[in-house]
Image (cartoon, rainbow, N blue to C red):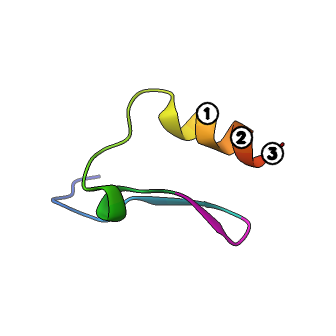
Amino acid sequence: MGGSGGVFEVTAGDSLVFSKKKLGRHAEPGEVVGLLRKQGN
């Protein structure tokens, strides 16, 4: 699957967990998983 400069957003329920567009960068390895685990608490 190819892409160029697309939006990458991760949500959990109604909460935005990570947004490439908002932060202006890609997620670091393990970052999204860590953020999802935090949401679970």
Q: Earlier in the sequence, mark 3 or mark 1?
A: 1
Number of marks in picture: 3
Q: Tag 2's secondary structure?
A: helix
Residue to which mark 1 is pinned:
34
The secondary structure type at the circle numbered 3 is: loop
Alpha carbon of mark 2 to alpha carbon of mark 3: how far?
5 Å
- The main secondary structure of the magenta stretch is strand
Q: Is residue 29 left or right of residue 1?
A: right
Q: Amino acid at mark 2?
A: Lys
**Residue 5 colored in magenta in the image:** no
Q: CA distance from mark 1 to mark 2?
A: 6 Å
Structural crowding at the residue carrying mark 1, measured as other residues with C-alpha within 10 Å and reported as few (<14), some (14–19) or many (≥20): few
- In this figure, which residue is indicated by the disc labeled 2? 38
**Extreme residue in the left direction:** 4
Asked if the residue at tag 2 contacts the one at tag 1, i.e. Cβ–Cβ closer than 8 Å, the answer is yes
Q: Nearer the viewer, residue 24 or 4?
A: 24
Residue at the spot 25% in from the left edge and 64% down from the top edge: 6
Q: Position of residue 24 (x, y in %)?
A: 25, 56
Which contiguous range is marked in magenta?
13-17
- SS assignment at label 1: helix
Name the residue type under label 3.
Answer: Gly
Q: Assess disc 3: are there few (<14), some (14-19) or many (≥20) residues with their C-alpha within 10 Å of its C-alpha.
A: few
Q: Is residue 15 magenta?
A: yes
Check disc 3 and report the residue beneath it: 40
